[in-house]
Image: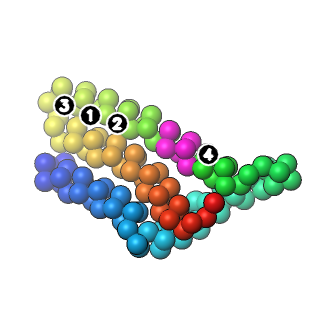
Amino acid sequence: MTKGKLKFSVAAHGALILLSLSPLAPLLGMVVALTFVAPVLALFAFGGGIAGGYDADLFVTGSFLALGTLGAFIALFFLYRAAADAEGGERDSARTMVSLAMSVLTAPLVMYLSYRSLGIG
């Protein structure tokens, strides 16, 4: 990955975060609700969460938190790989690993912010 592609990647991730904070965020929130939240709530229901009287919104928030935490650990691994590649003289591979780390950190954040823009919970 060249420097220009890395700069474009940083700009694209920033644009996604701004999109999740914009007035268009509920549209993206609907996509997140259908692709991530609905299956999570189905697992919650099948696991007996509704019968047990547990809060489904808290379960969804915990799922986003778990996804974000897992993403943070994966991003640390990618940054470790980037440091090792940069030390070995492979700058392009290091930039790719940095871009992957940004992707892993940005995705759960954008998903959570856009879902919360729906005003559910």
Name the amino acid type tagged 2.
Phe
State the SS at label 2. helix
Q: Which class describes the residues within 10 Å of circle 1: few (<14), some (14-19), or many (20+)?
A: many
Query: Rounded to the nearest whole Å, what is the CA distance between mark 3 and mark 2?
Result: 12 Å
Query: Rounded to the nearest whole Å, what is the CA distance between mark 3 and mark 1?
Result: 6 Å
From the top left corner, tell me how far across and down residue 97 is, in percent: 29, 40
Labels 4, 2: front one: 4
Residue indicated by mark 3: 86
Taking 40 as reference, is 65 above or below it? Answer: above
The way the protein has been coloured in the rendering is rainbow
Determine the residue located farthest toward the right in the rendered image: 51
> Which residue: 45% across, 34% down?
73
Which image quadrant for residue 18? Answer: bottom left
Query: Rounded to the nearest whole Å, what is the CA distance between mark 4 and mark 2?
Result: 24 Å
From the top left corner, tell me how far across and down residue 101 is, in percent: 34, 42
Q: Which residues are magenta?
A: 64-69
Taking 35 as reference, is 85 above or below it? Answer: above
> Which residue: 14% across, 49% down?
2
From the top left corner, tell me how far across and down residue 56 is, in percent: 71, 54
Q: Which class describes the residues within 10 Å of circle 3: few (<14), some (14-19), or many (20+)?
A: some
Q: Main secondary structure of the magenta part?
A: helix
Cβ atoms under marks 1 and 2 closer than 8 Å: yes
Cβ atoms under marks 3 and 1 closer than 8 Å: yes
Residue indicated by mark 4: 62
Name the amino acid type tagged 4.
Gly
Cβ atoms under marks 3 and 4 closer than 8 Å: no
Labels 1, 4: front one: 4
The answer to whether residue 84 is left or right of residue 121 is left
Q: Which mark is residue 56?
A: none
Q: Which mark is residue 82?
A: 1
Residue indicated by mark 2: 78
